[in-house]
Image (cartoon, rainbow, N blue to C red):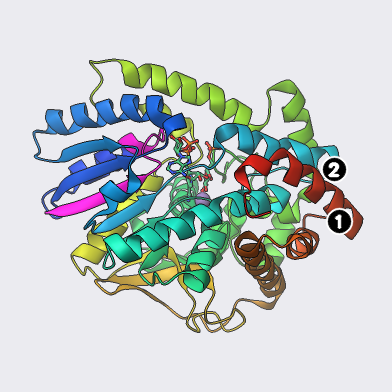
Amino acid sequence: GIKIVTIGGGSSYTPELIEGFIKRYDELPVRELWLVDIEKGKEKLNIVGNLAKRMVEKAGLPIDIHLTLDRREALKDADFVTTQFRVGLLEARAKDERIPLKYDVIGQETNGPGGLFKGLRTIPVVLDICRDMEELCPDAWLVNFTNPAGMVTEAVLRYSNIKRVVGLCNVPIGMRMGIAKALGVEPERVQVDFAGLNHMVFGLDVYVDGKSVLDEVIAALGNPENEMTMKNIAGFAWDADFIKGMGVIPCGYHRYYYKTDEMLQEEKEASIEKGTRAEVVQKLEAELFELYKNPDLAIKPPQLEKRGGAYYSDAACSLINSIYNDKRDIQPVNTRNNGAIASIPDDSAIEINCVITKEGPKPIGIGDLPVPVRGLVQQIKSFERVAAEAAVTGNYHTALVAMTINPLVPSDTIAKKILDEMLEAHKEDLPQF
Ligand code: NAD
Ligand code: G6P
Ligand code: MN
């Protein structure tokens, strides 16, 4: 039987993961699932862990669910390790979102200064997990969701000895579902050629039943009636002429780069009226955990779909299933470039359609990205590389360079002010600085 370890098991998304394993049990016989958390997350771990136990019991499956704060005990002989943790919890995210706003800069958990700081807090913990894995489960696959997922995958590839790592995100699934809805077809009939980076991924072409429908999708993106976004991103319609000129399909997060001003104004208003996304999520999460406590509940409640990461665990279960069964189907994941995108370094992480084999994802090469988007993707990749280096070394100057070269930060002096304030605000979670 298969042993899965989920780090950050107290996440409200865990029931989705359980649902995914239950659905696939015939092909993917999971015997042990270890949910790992830390002291601060103990209460959440217990609530969600008990719901998980009720779910497998209701399904009548012999999956043993273990709840633990001892990561090393859990990792012993694991086959797959999934990570979904949040260093500093939602309070840290709220700081990532609020501090940049004071300087008229986007405050977001994976983009701009917030993305940099989430990376600085997260990467040392991920590299620690990698060292434990080398020792305790050297053949296991690391399936990372922990944001910033692209930067984290980059750090694992370049600063650890773990080669079996895959980064995952729900944005590609979300784009596929959004496109299907706009075209009025079943999502299963839609295929998208994805390439780029995490939260910086483009659809280069789209097909329904194998026939390209790129022009229709581009027209649909310019129609304000189609809310092509994620739950956590304001869904401003794209300018129809701009998208037509670009000729590729942007993801929801591209709004931060191509509509920076509108997004900033929206964030500022929202932060006053309803709070930043972290503050909204704190309330959503409290509601979810109230539901999870109900001893009669033994399914994933539909309210989970209000979270931006809805369906992301489904991506994990599909990926694990395809690795385990050598399915060789196509899934968009974060993996080592190896020349698949010519203008990105070979040893860097990219998000791209891959053939999923028992030896892992094999990226489907695209040659190169179209010129209009190539430069932004390279700039974000440089940012991620410098940021990962700063996270590993704790070097102030490297962190300042990362902050300044991020396209959402307008100058070196503003970068320095934001950096200094955020280093101070997060110092408990940044032992390397
Ligand atoms: P959350 O705030 O519920 O955190 C999950 C758990 O992590 C908490 O119970 C917390 O106690 C625990 N934790 C914190 N530090 C830990 C550590 N060092 N070791 C083990 N556990 C630890 O977070 P969430 O909203 O469920 O999101 C979890 C993570 O997944 C975040 O990093 C988030 O950005 C990411 N996420 C990614 C995607 C994606 O598309 N890749 C989608 C949704 C969420
Ligand atoms: C999805 C992303 C995740 C992100 C999440 C935020 O858009 O792919 O990477 O972390 O939503 O959702 P939340 O509900 O926490 O704001
Ligand atoms: Mn994501």
Q: Residue 130, position in %: x, y?
A: 41, 61
Q: Is residue 120 left or right of residue 172?
A: right
Q: Residue at x 61, y 56 (%)?
A: 219
**Mark 1 vs 2, N-terminal side:** 2
Q: Residue at x 33, y 42 (%)?
A: 70
Q: Residue 167, position in %: x, y?
A: 44, 60
Q: Which portion, as a residue range, is magenta?
A: 1-15
Q: Is residue 289 left or right of residue 140?
A: right
Kindly identify which residue carries mark 2: 104
Instruction: Pick the residue in front: 6 or 76.
Output: 76
Q: In the rendered image, which quarter contains the N terminus?
A: bottom left
Q: Give the number of callouts.
A: 2
Q: Residue 178, position in %: x, y?
A: 49, 47
Q: Residue at x 60, y 78 (%)?
A: 344
For badge 1, the amino acid type reads Pro
Q: Is residue 168 left or right of residue 252?
A: left
Instruction: Assess whether mark 2 and mark 1 are in contact (beta carbons under 8 angstroms).
Output: yes
Residue 163, by quadrant, is: bottom left
Q: Residues within 10 Å of mark 1 (few under 14, many from 20)?
A: some
Q: Could you tell me how far apart the alpha carbons at marks 1 and 2 are, in whole angstroms? A: 9 Å
Q: Is residue 216 visible?
A: no
For badge 2, the amino acid type reads Asp
Kindly identify which residue carries mark 1: 410
Q: Residue 399, position in %: x, y?
A: 73, 60
Q: Residue at x 80, y 43 (%)?
A: 421
Residue 162, by quadrant, is: bottom left
Q: Helix, strand, or loop for circle 1?
A: loop
Q: In the rendered image, which quarter contains the C terminus?
A: bottom right
Question: In the picture shown, does residue 404 fall above or below 22?
Answer: below
Q: Is residue 432 visible?
A: yes
> Does the segment drawn in magenta span residue 59?
no
